[in-house]
Amino acid sequence: MTTAPLLSIIIPAYNEQLRLPATLAAIRAYVSAANITVEVLVADDGSSDATAAIVTEAATQWPALRLLALDHRGKGFAVRAGALAAVGDYVLLCDADLAVPISEWERVYANFVMGYDVVIGSREGQGAHREGEPFHRHLMGRVFNGLVRLLVVGNFHDTQCGFKAFRRPVAHDLFRRARIYGDDAPVIKGAAVTAFDVEILYLAVMRGYRVAEMPVLWHYGEETKVDPIRDALRNLRDIIRVRLFAMRGEYKRLNDPRA
């Protein structure tokens, strides 16, 4: 691209050979019909299946698409790498199953026009709609959100929805400051759903950015990689780490003037 696109779409992917083709096709159809200039970065989290090959092949027919090949360090690390590589005016994070329709971008952009710096999709609140979610998953989410509001940041009803967008300078500022899944994140085994979102939103509030929480339509994916016990413990560890870093003033020591 000779000029920066309007939108960078970041898709973290770990062994997504089954779901990714339909997601890429839906995004391509939408941005083409809406005449939106984009780059689409698939941040491949060290997949062992055909994810990388699928993206590489699709990119031969769609120049806006590119693969970001990474070691397997978890979703938080993959999202951060993708966000920092983005060159669009705005940076949109979405999941490989496109649980929130890409058409919700129109409403996200309206919030940017109103002056917001960060727009997060929310599966809670008036206007939000969850499709097909088991009760136990909803309950887990509500308990986790209660802990987030108690220990880290109390402003938001849903920090974990995978649909989030930032002005590019804001995305770069926040993800450069992220600690829990930074450059030193270890290589791992298996899928890892993390609470990196909590740290990013804590930083956004601390940095004084305007954050809009936007109710969205969200569809529960039957192929979810969430492990109720393992990921609950990992996410609890993540929010405790963010709380400890905040109490020690480690985020404030990073508080140099905005880029």
Image (cartoon, rainbow, N blue to C red):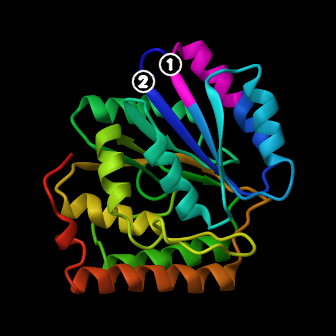
Q: Is residue 67 left or right of residue 214?
A: right
Query: At x 82% / y 30%, what residue is drawn?
Result: 57
Q: Secondary structure at mark 1?
A: loop
Q: Quadrant of the C terminus?
A: top left
Tell me which label, 1 or 2, sits earlier in the chain: 2
Identified by mark 2, the residue type is Leu
Q: Quadrant of residue 48?
A: bottom right
36 inside magenta stretch: yes
Please state the extent of the stretch shown in magenta in the rendering. Answer: 26-39
- Name the main secondary structure of what is drawn in magenta: helix
Q: Is residue 73 visible?
A: yes
Location of residue 68 in the rendering, given as x and y in whole percent from the top left corner: 63, 44
Residue designated by label 1: 37
Mark 1 vs 2: CB contact within 8 A: yes
Total labels drawn: 2
Query: At x 70% / y 48%, what residue is drawn?
Result: 97
Q: Secondary structure at mark 2?
A: loop
Residue designated by label 2: 6
Mark 1 packing: few (<14 Cα in 10 Å), some, or many (20+)?
some
105 inside magenta stretch: no
Mark 2 packing: few (<14 Cα in 10 Å), some, or many (20+)?
some
41 in relation to 78, above or below: above
Q: Quadrant of residue 65?
A: top right
Viewer-proximal residue, 174 or 219?
174
